[in-house]
Image (spheres, grey):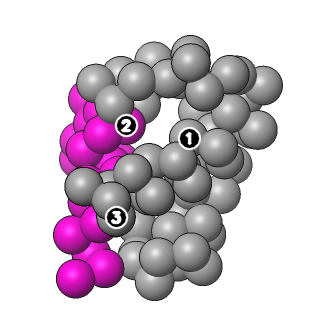
Amino acid sequence: MEKYQQVYDTVTEMICDAKDLEMSDLAPEMPLHQLKLDSLDYVELMVLAKREFGATLTAEMFIDKPNMTLGELCQSLVDAQQ
């Protein structure tokens, strides 16, 4: 759970900065589409994943799973690290 929390904190911090939100506005069960991320936000997430976690996120991943939650995204980053 420690790795997950680190990933979650890093990802939510980036989203909060990008969307001018507070950490308390986000929850793991929140679908990404609810955050109204634009294409640049998704690119920023992909760069963050590569830089911070050595994980590759693709546009197809977001397109194929339109109801992906914040928690599912973070768990996929944790899984990609192992």
Determine if the magenta segment contains residue 64. Answer: yes
- Tell me, for residue 2, which label it has, or none: none
Label 2 to label 3: alpha-carbon separation: 15 Å
In front of the other: 64 or 47: 47
**Taking 1 as reference, is 55 left or right?**
right
| Element on which disc 2 rests | helix
**Taking 16 as reference, is 30 left or right?**
left
Q: Are marks 1 and 3 in contact (CB under 8 Å)?
A: no
Position of residue 79 relative to residue 18, above or below, is below
Stretch of the chain drawn in magenta: 62-82
- Tell me, for residue 70, which label it has, or none: 2
Residue, disc 1: 12
Position of residue 32 relative to residue 63, above or below, is above
> Residue 35: percent from the left, percent from the top?
53, 23
In front of the other: 26 or 68: 26
| Element on which disc 3 rests | helix
Q: Amino acid at mark 2?
A: Leu
> Residue 77: percent from the left, percent from the top?
34, 64
Q: Quadrant of residue 1?
A: bottom left
Q: Main secondary structure of the magenta part?
A: helix
Q: Quadrant of residue 43?
A: bottom right
Residue, disc 3: 3
Mark closer to the observer (1, 3): 3
Q: Residues within 10 Å of mark 1 (few under 14, many from 20)?
A: many
> Residue 42: percent from the left, percent from the top?
56, 50
**Mark 1 or mark 3: which comes first in sequence?**
3
Residue at 76% x, 38% y is: 17
